[in-house]
Image (tube, rainbow, N blue to C red):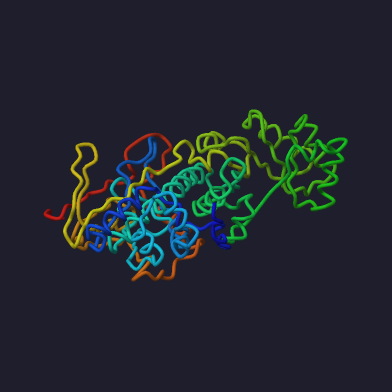
Amino acid sequence: MADLPTLSPVTGFRPALLTDHYELTMLGAALKDGTADRHCVFEVFARRLPPGRRYGVVAGTGRLIELLRDFRFEESELEFLQRNRVVDDRTAEWLSQYRFTGDIEGYAEGELFFPGSPILTVSGTFAETVVLETLVLSVLNYDCAVAAAAARMVTAARGRALIEMGSRRAHEEAAVAAARAAYLAGFASTSNLAAGARYGIPTAGTAAHAFTLVHDDEPSAFASQVEAYGTETTLLVDTFDISQGIRNAIAAAGRNLRAIRIDSGDLAVLAQQSRELLDSLGATETKILVSGDLDEYAIAALAAEPVDMYGAGTAVVTGSGAPTAGLIYKLVEVDGRPVVKRSERKATVGGRKVAVRRHKPTGTATEEVVVAQGTPEPRPHDRALQRPYVVGGEPVQLPSLEESREHLRQCLISIPWEGLKLSAGDPAIPVTIVGPDEKV
């Protein structure tokens, strides 16, 4: 087998073959029949939200644009495709010159979306846009799912800090993407060092039970950790007996110990008992961090308890039961003409969409209006939802991750309070989709 090209130092891999076989089947046939050069518009949207969700969160667009820069078919990749009869010589020659020259616009990272929201619009020739489908959906479906779950956890935490700890429960690259999406959603830090290095996300870590067990006893383990890191560390106190663990922690670090961590048991009861014991030992400023299979519901259940920080892992990287956002990539326009899929269960509205969100004078969002082949009639307090990402094949300056994080925070403030509930219900605001021949 031929060696693959050197991996990208930024992304860790080259994305051209992160593509379904059928994308290149369509490409080859379109090159042969002459439809490859037709100008097309594809849109990314969700027909519905995952069960129990009242909003989605746009995440991963920045990662997608980064990957698009490396979307190239090198000699070894083309040799693989031809050897396995995926493409013919003509298609291979076209792919060898591939550069995306079209336009991409969409909702900002951190924006909320609802069923029918056109969160990404990709326009260009059929050939150059169709081959991006799998990459677009694999990035956005995962990152949006993680961000939505993480945002719900942030809401449930009610201002208490959250640490993302899911690296060991995900594919190594998915773990980095999840850390980025969780930070965008409002998590304070991540345990993933690659995410810290790549995206500037604050990193944090405590210690595992193995560190305690490798020592002869718990006091020795705590003394070692405090000697290495001082009192600004967090001691894991539930390896044996939690009450004795807390006593050992304060004996090793003193009353100024930054935090203890509890990773098992009835966290509500243990948090209360731990707070009482810490206070009795004079460690009134020592924080309590809890972890252990926490999701938004478990976090909400601890709202009244003396918990200062949460560590969440598995639920974050799996989208807390919704590991995909259910996004699709649909052709909606060819050479300026709207095209429509008319399947009974999967009907779409043709034409390129323009979307605005409408608000009360107080800033509360009331409705999203999506117009095909036109623009919504302007009203006071409207906010346009789409922005350029790529123009003529060239990426434009993107907001920073910190700016996207703040954007989401403001969006969550703007929706009606019912939209923040964890219980099942309608989307936080309705979406009105107006077809090409309708009026707003």
Residues 391 and 382: in front is 391
Where on the picture, by quarter, is residue 37?
bottom left
Residues 29 and 122: in front is 29
* Residue 408 appears left or right of 425: right
Above/below status of 116 relative to 40: above
> Percent from the top left, x then y, of residue 121?
31, 58
Residue at 28%, 61% (x, y): give it.
381
Residues 289 and 240: in front is 240
Residues 102 and 48: in front is 102
Above/below status of 404 relative to 236: below
- Count of labels in the image: 0
* Residue 124 appears left or right of 249: left
> Percent from the top left, x then y, of residue 99?
39, 67
Where on the picture, by quarter, is residue 236?
top right
Residue at 56%, 39% (x, y): give it.
314
Above/below status of 383 relative to 230: below
* Residue 42 appears left or right of 200: left
> Percent from the top left, x then y, of residue 62?
46, 60
Above/below status of 389 relative to 111: below
> Percent from the top left, x then y, of residue 354?
25, 59
Picture quarter with the C terminus: bottom left
